[in-house]
Image (cartoon, helix red, strand yellow):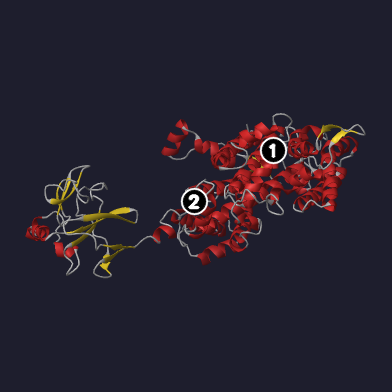
């Protein structure tokens, strides 16, 4: 499943040989992230973020398992148990802050990873399956992060649970019964908290499983690269180890420096102070917002303020509430169709002048605006801005990308990765 | 850092003879200035070992809080000492109380029980201790021990009225049959040690502080 010139694992010692014949796990590692995996020689630092996301997941699992040793999922005790972790448990403050900020850093890393894929066309054939699994991981992450945010049972936890489960009540006919089924009651309470804790513990392992599929699917065609040109021969690749273990290691060092800097010096920078108020089912905070990584989607939700119906008849086909929810879920589900919406055979944005303009001057500003508006109270100017940005978001993927793919004239591609790197054309013999 | 082995990571480099030669860093530096392709320690070996060592120290530093979080937290340690009013305990009576989530027996020994404890030849005991060593001077009638059998941690009988006190009139552990005498010393059965005497002090004639 790799290139024919991949180095073969050769067990050296007697024990290694004995193990290799019975359980070739070292061979698997060697072929997956060792010298046996040839990788394009021209990967830039954007290709670090897959490994960084994996590390972020490990940080979350390790700190999360430790937190679960001290946390109790009870509506009376959850908030206090989190404070107990912060004040009484040895190093508990550090572990909780690491888990809290670890979630944010996981999303930062994954968002950059997704943007890398969007810009360099990593979702295109033959890598569609990697992309589909990646979007699945993203959805699972969002569910996990949401349920984790509920666990401290502060004001934002409680009202976040109320609002998010409220999405389901928008579904016609079955919505409200479905919501009550999910919550195990009429409002978030003990039953909801307990099941959220159970699922929050389970989901990271489901994510880890899908990551294995994601990496497996990656190893069939091998990594993409900044030129988007396929690997043509051995001279286009270097072994993953030591070249990219070293490069990823360096990136990991930078990532960890930033992560601990925030964890130690600004641990609550990315959180919301209202979540340090115990949950009160009788009083909603004046302005409830989700965690920052959900803000673009929250803005899309809030952008739909008018019922969709037949004009002048008063017949409502889709109420605004349902529209908002559908649009919000649609904005992510849309990504599943991306490999077939962008029909250009050129992968990398470097060689696509028109695509590149829409990416940097359309999609990125649109997402910045959505993130900003998502955190603002629902006043007219922010709602209008969200509506414009949300409209662009959908137009970008559903209209602009297919048209651009058709009319764009890509720049000439290099003949090979090696030529792009060294500037010398490939000799026929080497090809 | 003087002994440096040739490490992996020399893919696509000209073959270098493996060597375990001990050289100084100064020598290594000289070789590197000359191109670093000769035998001996290369600058890259130093970088490898320094990097991996640094990562190892970092991993160990992270492991410390992850392990230390399991030890007793501040709220558990805050319950480390208790004060008990023993005025109501008559000679021959005992009470059970709880200290650090473990039972504690406080027993007011009768003169007969004190005599019985003092009559024993200390040298013949499995865990030789006199009653005086297990109580406070002038308060030899107050025997304060953990109610935790030193065999496998069951709570011995004998502290509450009507419970079996064992063959030696002290405590009897029903789990595996350890008998303790009136000074709560092990006399018969599998337990290796006398019932533990916690740290305690009389704050007044009737109030004792345990822990």
Q: Residue furthest top?
A: A173
| Disc 2, SS | loop
For the residues labelled 2 and 1, the Cα–Cα distance comes to 47 Å
Q: Chain of mark 1?
A: A
Which dot, 2 or 1, sits closer to the camera? 1
- The structure residue drawn at horizontal position 85% and vertical position 43%, both measured from the top left corner, is A392
Residue A237 shows in the view: no
B75 vs A144, left or right, is left
Residue A199 in the image: x percent, y percent? Answer: 56, 39
Q: Quadrant of residue A31?
A: top right
| Disc 1, SS | helix
Q: Residue furthest right?
A: A312
Q: Name the residue that disc number 1 marks.
A: A135
Marks 2/1 same chain: no
Is residue B117 depicted above or below A419 in this figure? below
Q: Residue A266 or B187: which is nearer the viewer?
A: B187
Q: Name the residue that disc number 2 marks.
A: B18
């Amino acid at each position: 499943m790799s290139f024919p010139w991949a180095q073969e694992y050769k067990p050296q010692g007697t024990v290694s040989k004995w193990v290799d014949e019975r359980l070739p796990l070292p061979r698997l590692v060697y072929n997956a992230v060792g010298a046996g995996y040839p990788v394009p020689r021209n990967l830039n630092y954007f290709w670090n973020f897959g490994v960084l996301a994996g590390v972020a997941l490990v940080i979350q699992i390790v700190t999360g398992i430790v937190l679960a040793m001290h946390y109790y999922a009870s509506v009376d005790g959850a908030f206090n148990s989190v404070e107990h972790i912060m004040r009484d448990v040895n190093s508990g403050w550090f572990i909780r802050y690491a888990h809290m900020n670890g979630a944010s850093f996981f999303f930062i890393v994954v968002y950059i990873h997704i943007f890398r894929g969007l810009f360099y066309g990593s979702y295109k054939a033959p890598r569609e399956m990697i992309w589909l699994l990646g979007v699945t991981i993203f959805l699972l992450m969002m569910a996990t992060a949401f349920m984790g945010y509920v666990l401290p049972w502060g004001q934002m936890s409680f009202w976040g649970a109320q609002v998010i489960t409220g999405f389901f009540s928008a579904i016609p006919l079955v919505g409200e019964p479905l919501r009550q089924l999910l919550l195990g009651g009429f409002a978030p309470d003990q039953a909801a908290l307990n099941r959220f804790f159970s699922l929050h513990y389970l989901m990271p392992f489901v994510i880890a499983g899908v990551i294995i599929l994601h990496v497996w699917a990656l190893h069939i065609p091998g990594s993409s690269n900044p030129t988007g040109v396929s690997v043509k021969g051995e001279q286009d690749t270097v072994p993953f180890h030591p070249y990219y273990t070293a490069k990823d290691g360096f990136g990991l060092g930078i990532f960890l420096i930033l992560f601990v800097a925030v964890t130690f010096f600004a641990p609550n920078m990315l959180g919301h102070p209202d979540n340090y108020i115990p949950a009160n089912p009788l009083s909603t905070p004046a302005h409830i917002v989700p965690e920052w990584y959900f803000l673009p989607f929250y803005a899309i939700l809030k952008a739909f303020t008018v019922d969709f119906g037949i004009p002048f008849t008063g017949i409502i086909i889709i109420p605004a509430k349902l529209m908002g929810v559908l649009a919000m879920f649609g904005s992510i589900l849309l990504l599943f169709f991306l490999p077939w919406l962008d029909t250009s055979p050129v992968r990398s944005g470097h060689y696509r002048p028109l695509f590149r303009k829409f990416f940097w001057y359309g999609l990125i500003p649109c997402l910045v605006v959505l993130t900003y508006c998502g955190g603002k109270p629902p006043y007219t100017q922010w709602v209008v801005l969200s509506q414009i940005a949300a409209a662009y978001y959908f137009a970008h993927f559903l209209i602009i990308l297919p048209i651009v793919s058709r009319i764009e004239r890509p720049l000439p591609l290099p003949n090979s990765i090696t030529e792009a790197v060294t500037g010398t054309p490939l000799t026929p013999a080497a090809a | 850092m003087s002994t440096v082995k040739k490490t992996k990571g020399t893919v696509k480099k000209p073959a270098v003879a493996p060597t375990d030669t001990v050289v100084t860093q100064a020598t290594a530096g000289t070789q590197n200035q000359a191109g670093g392709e000769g035998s001996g320690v290369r600058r890259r070996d130093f970088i490898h070992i320094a990097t991996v060592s640094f990562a190892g120290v970092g991993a160990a530093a992270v492991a410390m809080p992850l392990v230390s979080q399991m030890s007793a937290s501040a709220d558990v340690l805050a319950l480390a000492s208790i004060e008990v009013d023993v005025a109501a305990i008559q000679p021959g009576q005992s009470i059970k109380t709880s200290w650090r989530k473990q039972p504690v027996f406080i027993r007011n020994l009768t003169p007969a029980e004190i005599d019985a404890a003092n009559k024993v030849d200390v040298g013949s005991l499995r865990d030789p201790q006199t009653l005086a060593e297990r109580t406070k001077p002038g308060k030899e009638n107050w025997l304060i021990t953990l109610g935790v059998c030193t065999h496998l941690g069951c709570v011995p009988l004998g502290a509450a009225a009507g419970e079996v006190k064992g063959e030696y009139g002290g405590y009897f552990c029903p789990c595996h049959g350890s008998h303790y005498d009136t000074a709560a010393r092990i006399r018969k059965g599998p337990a290796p040690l006398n019932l533990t005497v916690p740290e305690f002090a009389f704050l007044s004639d009737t109030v004792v502080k345990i822990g």
